[in-house]
Amino acid sequence: MKVFLLCALCGFFAQLIDGTLGMAYGISAGTFLRSMGFSSALSSFCTHTAEIFTTLASGLSHFAMKNVDKVLFCQLLLPGIAGGILGACLLTGIDDTILSPAVSVYLIVMGIVLFIRAFRKAPEKRRSMGRGVYPLAFIGGFSDSAGSGGWGPIVTSTLAASGCDVRKTIGSVNAAEFFVTLAESFTFFLTMGSLGEALPAAAGLIAGGAAASPIAAVLCRKIPVKPLIASVGALIAALNAWKLYTALS
């Protein structure tokens, strides 16, 4: 019950962030879980198990609203799945005392990326990345599973920054994320040992996220986005910097 309640709290705040920004659920939840003492692999498994439900709802919504570019969706799908599976295998195959500092460094970088993104102006010209989408999706999937999150901040931000249509980018990336998340979760399930602690943790994330969703929808219209992105980025970087310091000291 203690694990469930703590993870429900984590899920609540992670969903508040994601529902307001449209990204960073995985990075936020993974950071909170690792700060509570969960291993990198267990944090990623719990996060992505919870995300199966949120990404399914999000993907269906974007398809219904015709926000999905079918070509871009197909370009993202297989490389993203392949990268996610590889990242999950790497995460469960390496001792956490070695892997945890590396994950902390990655999440510090992602926190800084979010912070910088808050002050970056979007380009006016719209264009396509062409074949560059394939390696981007692979890197996004790999980072997403290996670092508990990063698909949205890496893939969505890069495509939007390159000048791609923002609405189609968000819709296509979110639709593909369900399949990437499903593949990552299944890989973790097959490669991890004991999952006894993971089930109440994942259930807590789902319950907390469900409770936060309507609140996040209201906050999305009330809170200025850029200061919030900067604050979340700074918090993620600070928490993981402390985690890195304690791991190395």
Image (spheres, rainbow, N blue to C red):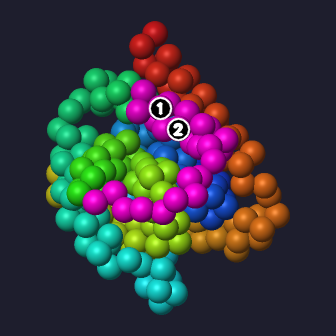
Residue 22 position in % (x across, y down): 58, 62
Is residue 51 visible in the rendered image? The answer is no
Q: Is residue 28 above or below residue 213?
A: above
Q: Is residue 98 above or below residue 229?
A: above
Residue shown at 32% from the left, 72% from the top: 73
Give the amino acid type for the residue marked by disc 1 in the picture: Val
Give the amino acid type for the residue marked by disc 2 in the picture: Val
Residue 247 position in % (x across, y down): 43, 19
Residue shown at 64% from the left, 34% from the top: 234
Residue 235 position in % (x across, y down): 64, 36
Residue shown at 73% from the left, 65% from the top: 220
Q: Which segment did they paint magenta?
A: 105-130
Residue 156 position in % (x across, y down): 46, 57
Q: Quadrant of residue 93?
A: top left
Q: Is residue 33 magenta?
A: no
State the residue position of label 2. Answer: 113
State the residue position of label 1. Answer: 109
In the depicted view, which residue is nearer to us: 100 or 78?
78
Q: Is residue 59 left or right of residue 82?
A: right
Q: Quadrant of residue 223?
A: bottom right
